[in-house]
Image (tube, helix red, strand yellow):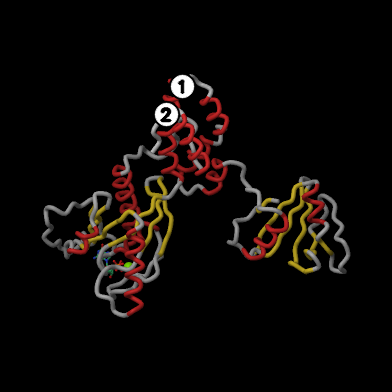
Amino acid sequence: MRLLTPYGLGGIAVLFASSGPERDRLIACLRDARNRALLTTPLAPPRRGALWIEGTLFDEVLVVDRRDGLELHVHGSPRLLDELALRFGPWEPSVSSPAESLLMAAMSVAQLDLALEQSAYDFAAFLAALQREPLAQQKISLAAALLRSCVARALVVPHRLVLAGRQNAGKSTLFNRLLFSERALTGSLPGLTRDPLREVTCLEGYPYELVDVAGAGEAIDSIDAKAQARARAEQAAGELLIVVDGSLGPTDQDRALWSPQAVVVVSKADLPPAAWPEDFPVDLRVACADPASAGRVRAALGAVLQKRRRLPVAGVIFGPAALSEEQWCSLRAAAGAAGLDSA
Ligand SMILES: Nc1nc2c(ncn2[C@@H]2O[C@H](COP(=O)(O)OP(=O)(O)O)[C@@H](O)[C@H]2O)c(=O)[nH]1
Ligand SMILES: [Mg+2]
């Protein structure tokens, strides 16, 4: 049975049982308002019913009998869906390929272009054909597929960036601009950001998971101290976007956070700048206070990140590529078997 709506996100979930035994099994569990077997025929008007399983009323449902199967509208709670999955087998994916799922969920034109390009290929068939080539040719083809797939994966899997820097540096303001929304609380009061906030956005076509966390500084209470500890844990597990208040300059804490992978953004470029130490690299200077700066800030940071990650202009990649984890694993296994280093 397929789940046609996103798992656990809506008040109502739509399930689909295609014709045959799957449909019969479901119909056997349906009762009408008078507790009789629910009779339905393809293209009959939608009917209200009750879903009974093992003598228990599970849910009140809407039954839509379509030509190619039965649609069941149930309540969308994850708990109910899990119980139903136990009885009716695990949900089949409602889309048939990774390219198709990217097509449904694309957040940028570049992702959409990639999804359209990749849906014209059958990756499994491509990989099988490639493995029948003579070894020398196979190695060349696999190396090219690995390269394409690295770019494709960068277009599909959000790259995690955790904001870091002292309280009031402007982290949450930057986070909001990058998201085009007032997602995080901002202000001159220290300790405004507590639980880590995570959002995905596309910059120059590539997806990023941005994590806004509490800033480093004096903890005003035990809640703030815990928030700072959570921030350090997030920062230890992700690549850093260090935000430094340009009117104050970097602190020893900023220096301690720095690594060659970190991206340093100097905020408040509209204010008179502090003296800046020569040995502390800067990747970008921004003025974020005005929401109208969002487009500019997003484009500038997107370009810095794209260059840092050595990624091409986002879009089509001119050949079949691994989009899902599963495809990526099978490509790497094939490369390993052919004697290529795919790390
Ligand atoms: N002038 C100016 N003020 C800014 C800028 N970015 C942030 N601020 C202000 O700095 C203060 C702290 O910002 P916030 O984003 O909450 O800092 P956080 O503690 O690092 O998350 C707020 O009052 C912001 O309005 C900027 O680019 N220019
Ligand atoms: Mg904040």
Q: Which residue is mark 1?
A: 135
Classify mark 1 as within 8 Å of ligand 1 or not, answering yes or no: no
Image side of residue 15 versus residue 324, left or right: right
The percent coordinates of residue 85 (x first, y second) are 68, 57
Q: Which residue is mark 2?
A: 339
Instruction: Name the image quarter holding residue 313.
Output: top left
Asked if 306 appears above or below 193 in the picture, the reply is above
Instruction: Name the image quarter holding residue 294.
Output: bottom left
Q: Residues within 10 Å of mark 1 (few under 14, many from 20)?
A: few
Q: Residues within 10 Å of mark 2 (few under 14, many from 20)?
A: few
Residue at screen point 45% across, 35% down: 316
- Mark 2 is on which residue type? Gly
- Which is nearer the eye, 37 or 248? 37
- Which is nearer the eye, 239 or 301? 239
The percent coordinates of residue 196 (x first, y second) are 39, 66
Of marks 1 and 2, which one's residue comes earlier in the chain? 1
Label 1–label 2 contact, CB within 8 A: yes
Image side of residue 52 versus residue 327, left or right: right
Image side of residue 36 versus residue 244, left or right: right
The Cα–Cα distance between marks 1 and 2, rounded to whole angstroms, is 9 Å
- Mark 1 is on which residue type? Leu
Instruction: Name the image quarter holding residue 100.
Output: top right
Please tell me in which quarter of the rendered image ligand 2 is found.
bottom left
Residue at screen point 46% across, 21% down: 135
